[in-house]
Structure formats: structure tokens, C-alpha cells
Image (spheres, rainbow, N blue to C red):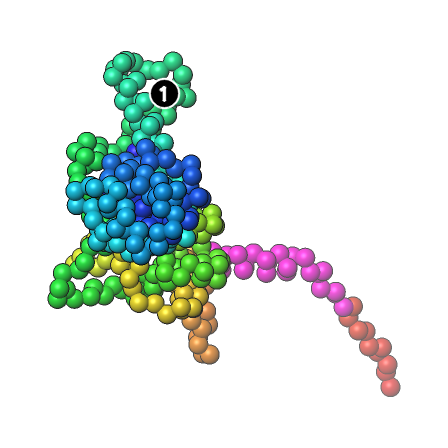
Amino acid sequence: MTHPDLVLRAEQAVIGAALRDRQRLDDIAYLTPDRMAHPTHRALLTALVESRTSNPTTPAAQLPELIAQRTAISGVNADYLRRLADAAPQPRALATYARMVQEAAVRRDLTQHVDRLRTTSPGLRGPDPVLDRLAQAMRRTEHAVPVAKYNEPAPAPYEPRARPAGEQEVRVEARLERQDAVLAELLQHPEQVREVAWLYQEVFEEGPRREVYEAIVVVAERGDPVDQLTVEWEVYQQDPQTYEVKVEVSVEQREERPDYLARLATTAVVVGAAVGLSGEIMAEDIRTKLATDFGNIDVTTRAPEVEPKASRDITAATQAPQLAAQLLQPPPVQQAPTIQPNIRP
């Protein structure tokens, strides 16, 4: 199953985007309210769809009051709905968020079928090896979601966890700071992704930084909007098992991966700086690889008065060709002695 926190955020993004631009509901007609995991979201989507026909002329500014009256859910008032609308990452990306919700619903359906099979025939392998491997894979990646989680009152609109007041900004080493700056700009200004398309993923530190860069590139190439939610969703799909692993920020501090993405989304950036920083990152990676590849070679700096130091192998290799050259030369020509005539006076 998809991580429950991501599912709630995707559903809230759908509701918030629809509140800001109700006309875009036409783009997600396939998403029926029953595909929402949380009952509050099911009721809100139902009210939004019905308001298209019952109150088509209601302006967006008054829509929260209308939906709050129609649903009459405890804790859901006009202010709550406005907060949902404000938290929606990109209203124009409603179709993308709806697809994520639909994907999570399909995964829930598959998990329910797996649980049903497990209950009816525990310990027995299925008759179809392909389906059996699928069930095993889903059991490895599923998350235990408490039933009460989806029966609670309306969940609070998503907000990145605020840093405690007075907390000092953590400074990372320069190499990682450059990588964070590039990722922050690509996350906030995805149009810059094509400007650094030549940047290969191995230049980023192995772990969350590399995974975030891979996710940004995949989302951009797919044509989906790049924002914190879509990138975090893609990171989770890459490896659900390590999704909650913490990212190293400094020697003294570690932070969870969602908080790392939230920090990137709020980092001050200079648009266009990612190109120059990417060049520095790649140059540093190339220097590191060259130093590793040629680290065992004995290179002696040659001064004007110092001859280069040669190893035994090099000396033996140079002597052999010289000897062969001597053997291949023709023998010296024997000159006949000059006989002077003995002329007596």
C-alpha cells in the first residue's frame, strides 16, 4: 500500500485544487468519491461534484461556505476548506493528484484481495505462480494502517513541520551544500531541469539526495508538475522500504526525508544558479574519480635538475628494446688494412 500520509496529502491536494478551480473537475470525471480513503474527503468530493449542477454560478470565494453547509461534517467549516485550498500545491495539476489518488485506491483493492486470500488459505501457495509472487511482493511493501486512522475526524490540512523557534540553521559541508542548492532550485523552478539534463545522478551523494534528483527527473520527463508532493510520491515508489530513512544533514543533526524535502521547498534560491553549481558538482566528481583511478600510479614531479624516477618494471621494459635494437643493427664493416708500397731510394 502507498504510505497513508502521502495518500491523505494527495486527497487533500485534489479537494484543495477543486475548491480553487471547480471547472477542472471535468478533467477527473473518472475519480469517483468512493476512491477516496478518508470519509471526510469522500463527502467533500461528492459535494463539489454535485455543486457543479446545483450551484453552477457560485463564485470560488463563496464555495467554501457552500460546501461546508452541504456536508455538515464536524470540524469542517469554511475556514478549514480555505486552508485546504491554500495548501493545494498547484491547482492546475489537479489531474496529476487525482491519478495518484486512483493509484493508491487500486493498491488498497489489491491488498484487500491479498488479505482475503491469506484468510481463506493461510500458509498455502496460490495455484498461479505469477499471482503468488505478486502477493508476496505486496506483503513485503504493505504498511499497517490502523483502521481508526480513516475513521477519525477531518485531518488537518498538510503543513510542513515548522522548525522550533531559535533553532540555528545547520551548515553542511560545501560539497553537500551545493547539491542541496541544485535540488532546491529544481524543486522550486522545474523549468530548470532541462538546463541541467546532462547532469548524471551519480554525482549526488548516495542516499536521499540522489533519490530526490532521480525523482525530479522522472516526474519532469513524464510531464507531471514537479512539486514537493509529486516528488515525494515518486521517491516512495522507488523504494518504499527506505522511505522513512533519515537523511544526514550534518554530524550533529539528522532529519527525516519528508522534512528534508520540505526544507528544499523553502530554501532561498537564485534562479539559474543550478547550471553553474551543477558544473562544479560534475567537475568535483570527475576529479574524485580520476584521483581514485590513478591513485596507485607513482608520479614524480620533474624538476629541471631532477630526472624522473623509474621503477624496475619501467627500467626492464626500456632495457629490452635497447638490446633488441643493438642486435638488429648490421655488424660493423671490417676495413682492409692499407698497404703502403715499400719504395727504396
Q: Neighbour class for label 1 at 10 Å: few (<14), some, many (≥20)? A: some
Percent x, y of residue 202: 40, 53
Percent x, y of residue 48: 33, 43
Image-based side of 244 in relation to 29, left or right: left
Q: Amino acid at mark 1?
A: Asp
Percent x, y of residue 146: 18, 33
Quadrant of res 278: bottom left
Instruction: Please state which of residues 19 and 187 is positioned toward the viewer in this rendering.
Output: 19
Residue at image location 25% in from the left, 17% down from the top: 119
Is residue 108 at least partly visible in the picture?
yes
For the C terminus, the quadrant is: bottom right
Q: Looking at the image, is 225 positioned above or below residue 336?
A: above
Is residue 7 a member of the stretch shown in magenta? no
Residue at image location 37% in from the left, 35% down from the top: 32
Span highlighted in magenta in the image: 312-335
Instruction: Please state which of residues 232 and 12 is positioned toward the viewer in this rendering.
Output: 12
Percent x, y of residue 244: 24, 44
Is residue 318 a member of the stretch shown in magenta? yes
Q: Looking at the image, is 124 positioned above or below residue 345?
A: above
